[in-house]
Image (spheres, rainbow, N blue to C red):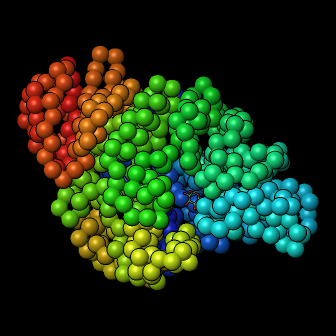
Amino acid sequence: MAIDKRKVVYQIYPKSFKDTTGSGTGDLNGVTEKLPYLKELGIDMIWLNPFYPSPQRDNGYDVADYTAVNPDFGTMADFEAMVARGKELGIDFMLDMVLNHCSTDHEWFQKALAGDEYYQDFFILRDEPTDWVSKFGGNAWAPFGDTGKYYLHLFDVTQADLNWRNPRVREELFKVVKFWQDKGVKGFRFDVINLIGKDEVLEDCPINDGKPAYTDRPITHDYLHELNQASFGQDDSFMTVGEMSATTVENCILYTAPEREELSMAFNFHHLKVDYQDGQKWTIMDFDFEALRSLFHTWGVGMSEGNGWNALFYNNHDQPRALNRFVDIKRFRNEGATMLAASIHLSRGTPYIYMGEEIGMIDPDYDSMADYVDVESLNAYQIMLDEGKTPEEAFKIIQAKSRDNSRIPMQWDASDNAGFTTGTPWLKAGKSYKEINVAKEKEGVIFTFYQDLIKLRKELPIIAEGDYQAAFSTHDKVYAFERFLNDDKLLVLNNFFAEDVELDIPEPYQGGQVLISNYDTASIGERLTLQPYQTLAILGQ
Ligand code: GLC
């Protein structure tokens, strides 16, 4: 399975992208309407977050029916029209497959609850809970009706983990994957897929909330190989990405090395925990640059040497905007946004752009807890209060860390609700939309820089295919790497700070050609000054 490494993926959170009905919820027709805009940006594939029927406790990651369209988002005919229009424009679709768990509203769970033993074996039921902590807070087990048993839910109590050990569960889930494949989609993003393999005997695990007991278990690789062979593995042009929770380089090489026939690439999140105090999300801390740099180097080099493949990203629907985390946005939003973009688009792996990133969208800056709807944020707020934080302290943390930060309506123009809806949006628009919106930014610095980066990846094999090596690997301000392909070499320098940095340029790059930069840069001599948040890519000789 060799994927096309020139491709760039754009992620759409359909609920917040474009509402064509005035319901306040984005819809599939909204995606279709905006395809020409994405064509102009230059992307190849759209990853759509879940749009299946769901009680929306976790915004669609609680799937109640895997093979239908939630009427709030449109119809199956809308879906088919969207895919067909995409094909005309050369844009394919990647769907989100949430196969680790399903909603407790799903008929499998309902039948199980009603006493059907066949479906009880679809879930992970035990007489005694373990001490594992749910990722959304509290114990990960809940009473299974009045049977005296408990079912496992690594996420919300309404998201019951599926029992992959049961071959009939795998068969059903593979059918789901085939169903969408037959509808013409060309990619899948598998939600928390490294959690599907649970051991036969489940035991208490006091380390790290129990994560080692269910993360990256060896049998997961067998399941992914089986899934691959049962569905997309036959199609060479297919692109799959696994969302890997708390994973390792070693496992991601196994998940993604082509000869293993598991997945095409993997998301890991280590680089997005560098502003977590003591590894805890619900804290506030400036980002630790050296940790970020060394994680990028470890993953870049490790995956390159092991023939694995990274999915490269800073933003998604679960993360606050990278601009708020890594950049002095009051002074350097354009420079910071373009530098961050180059630092992944010129690296080894497949770049993902999260909607709004291409215009430099930032967090909404809400004023009150009443503006937040995300289940994880609401739980976390309550837990922080219970632990003794004041409402002000807890709110400040939610403001910085909530997943709603990225889920706000896409900012199309300066009209009401950012041009997202004519109704009342399900989640309030961000405060910045009058200044930051597509209408204003489309000819602007950030959007055009993304266009250039996407073009370069298509034109220069060294960007798509080259090996990765760390450069300036102990520098305290600059994240730099080299790419190599045959006799070509490329050096990419990224200044992560709002200040000038002096650098000695390695010999092969002195007099080299500037491939791209977010500042005007004349010739490359022995020494140069990187300006605040400057990115500079130099072809060597
Ligand atoms: C993934 C999704 C997230 C969801 C969780 C449970 O991390 O990205 O949004 O809440 O899985 O499905």
* In the rendered image, the vertical position of residue 305 relative to residue 174, given as above or below: above
Viewer-nearest residue: 321 or 200: 200
Where the N terminus falls, by quadrant? top right
For the point 40% across and 80% down, which residue is it?
Answer: 392
Ligand 1, by image quadrant, is bottom right
For the point 47% across and 38% down, which residue is it?
Answer: 310
In terms of image quadrants, where is residue 316?
A: bottom left
| Residue 372 pos. (x, y %) | 47, 77
Residue 56 relative to residue 275: left or right? right
Q: Which residue is outermost to the top?
A: 487
For the point 39% across and 64% down, which residue is it?
Answer: 284
Residue 375 relative to residue 340: left or right? right
| Residue 268 pos. (x, y %) | 50, 45
* In the rendered image, the vertical position of residue 98 relative to residue 368, given as above or below: above
In terms of image quadrants, where is residue 333?
A: bottom left
Q: Is residue 189 visible?
A: no
Residue 483 relative to residue 29: left or right? left
* In the rendered image, the vertical position of residue 410 relative to residue 46, given as above or below: below
For the point 37% across and 45% down, which residue is it?
Answer: 292
Residue 294 relative to residue 524: left or right? right
